[in-house]
Amino acid sequence: MQRAALLDAARSLLSEGGTEALTFPALAERTGLARSSVYEYFRSRAAVVEELCAVDFPVWAAEVEAAMAAAEGPEAKVEAYVRQQLTLVGDRRHRAVVAISASELDAGAREKIRAAHGGLVAMIVEALGEMGHGQPRMAAMLLQGVVDAAVRRIELGAAEEPSVIVEAAVSMALRGVRG
């Protein structure tokens, strides 16, 4: 239960203040534990980050996968892939993952994040192949680039409303730069 409370506190700290806010003293304060007790659960900030990725990314990916499974046809699956990821932007788990990806991580943590993102990209390859893309894996990686750019734009509080950014990303995914 303490480990779960620490992870929940880490999510809150990351979503509220980014990686700078994720400190062991802050985790201790949020959970009511002594600072030395936090070290009993995690040896470093990177260890907290790795565990958050291991716990939260599969939940996020499952939500994207469920949205795609409910869609009929390859174009609807692409749209669901983009929309669901962008819908999750305001979610604490997602904000924590975004904050994590911007932080200084060791090689092991970075590899785990890359593998998780690879699994997300793999979800859309089949639909892109069904749409006639000659290189669906490359198209999936480029599509994820559009999603990632839209996520950053929403997270930064761009001048446009998030719904406008979502619609622009879906349009680019389905119709390219012609809109």
Image: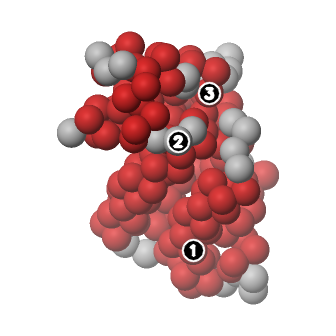
Left of 87 or right of it: where is 155?
A: right
Determine the residue positioned at 46% across, 41% down: 42
The quarter of the displayed image where residue 28 is located? top left
Question: Disc 2 vs disc 3: Cβ atoms closer than 8 Å?
Answer: no
Residue 171 image position (x, y, % from top left): 63, 50
| Quadrant that contains the N terminus | top left
**Would you call the spot at circle 1 few (<14 residues within 10 Å), some (14-19), or many (20 or more)?**
some
Label 3 or label 1, whichever comes before in sequence order: 3
Crowd band around label 3 with a 10 angstrom C-alpha radius: few (<14), some (14–19), many (20+): many
Mark 2 crowdedness (10 Å alpha carbons): few <14, some 14-19, many ≥20: few
The residues tagged by marks 1 and 2 sit, at their Cα atoms, a distance apart of 32 Å
Front residue of this view, candidates 178 and 105: 105
Q: Label for residue 122?
A: 1
Amino acid type of the residue tagged 1 in the rendering = Ala
Q: Is residue 137 left or right of residue 164?
A: right
Mark 3 and mark 1: span between their CA atoms? 28 Å
- x 75%, y 74%: residue: 138
Q: Position of residue 57 (x, y in %)?
A: 46, 53
Residue 166 in the image: state x and y as whole percent.
Answer: 56, 39
Residue placed most toward the observer, 17 or 147: 17
Q: How did the renderer colour the structure?
A: secondary structure
Query: Mark 3 = which residue?
Result: 19
Which amino acid lies under the numbered mark 3 shown in the image of this protein?
Thr
Residue 4 position within the rendered picture, expressed as x and y whole percent measured from the top left: 29, 39
Label 2 to label 3: alpha-carbon separation: 17 Å
Q: Judge depth for marks 2 and 3 and give the one in front.
A: 2
Numbered label tally: 3
Q: Which residue is mark 2?
A: 43
